[in-house]
Image (cartoon, rainbow, N blue to C red):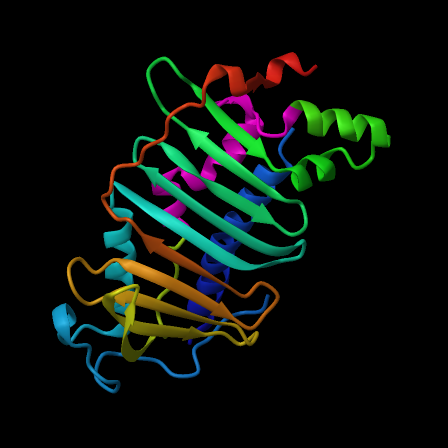
Amino acid sequence: MSATVSATARRDRRPRRAALVAVLSAAVALGATACGSSAGDSGGDKPKATGPFGDMSAAQILDKAVATTKGARSLTVVLDGKTADGPMKGHLSTDVQGRCTGTMTVGAAGAADLIRPVEPTDKHVYLRFDEAALKEQSKDEPAEVQAEVVKAMKGRWLMSDADSPDARDMLDLCDLKKMTADFEQDSAGAVKGTETTIDGTKALSLTLDYKDGEKDTFYVATEGKPYLLRVVTTGGDEPGTVSFTGFEKPVTATAPAMKDVIDEKTLG
């Protein structure tokens, strides 16, 4: 791979993973080297994809999958990986209007449920933390204060303005266009792999190997629209899996009952 391509891949690839990790970390905490493929694929030397791809190269297939996924009006993203703070998991459904609902966990900080309704009369985002997350956020306080925080907040939703700085950072993963754009990268050097099945959908695997020992394996649907179904990262400091499901399915994000809501502005 040329120096120009390597630099581009290094620049474009890292923000994608960092963005996903940062969003989860922000939600729960709210209140390397140049890359190069070990083998390229110009479309003539590697096995041809069956199904809708014909003689397309691996790079062309990957570009098409990312573009198709970016065009979805709604989807669900499932994350399972590792960060410097420990294990990371997330399950969120979102649409192009910004409706969003799901659950996120990072390390030992506990879990947070999220709802963003995006209704004309509701410009808020709602977060509900489990007991572990509440204790983590108040860990520097005396034991009696921690107990009060848990008593007051457990099972209740914290309401924040969706356009507040903290909420904007947290809601990056609820921005469908921004989230899928994070998966755009230099696809040169992608190699076709085997055909398999991902959650009942036939898919073709494509791989990108990097000089730092990391490898991304992309799974692209070979039936129906060529959506990006899964990305598996191995090696390096942040291995993990990102899966996409629920394409074009309506996202139901209903605000919780007000009796179960605490307005962030009243906390002081």
Q: Is residue 138 left or right of residue 153?
A: right
Query: Residue 76: x and y, percent?
Result: 35, 47
Q: Is residue 63 left or right of residue 162?
A: left
**Residue located at (50% from left, 30% from top):** 168
Work out whether residue 176 or residue 265 is closer to the camera in this orientation and state it: 265
**Residue located at (53% from left, 20% from top):** 260
**Residue located at (30% from left, 63% from top):** 199
| Image quadrant where residue 123 sits | top left
Query: Residue 241: x and y, percent?
Result: 46, 62
Location of the N terminus by quadrant is bottom left
Q: Is residue 74 left or right of residue 108?
A: left
Query: Residue 154: x and y, percent?
Result: 63, 30
In the picture shown, does residue 60 fall above or below 195? above
Work out whether residue 178 or residue 129 is closer to the camera in this orientation and state it: 129
In the picture shown, does residue 175 fall above or below 68? above
Work out whether residue 7 or residue 183 is closer to the camera in this orientation and state it: 183
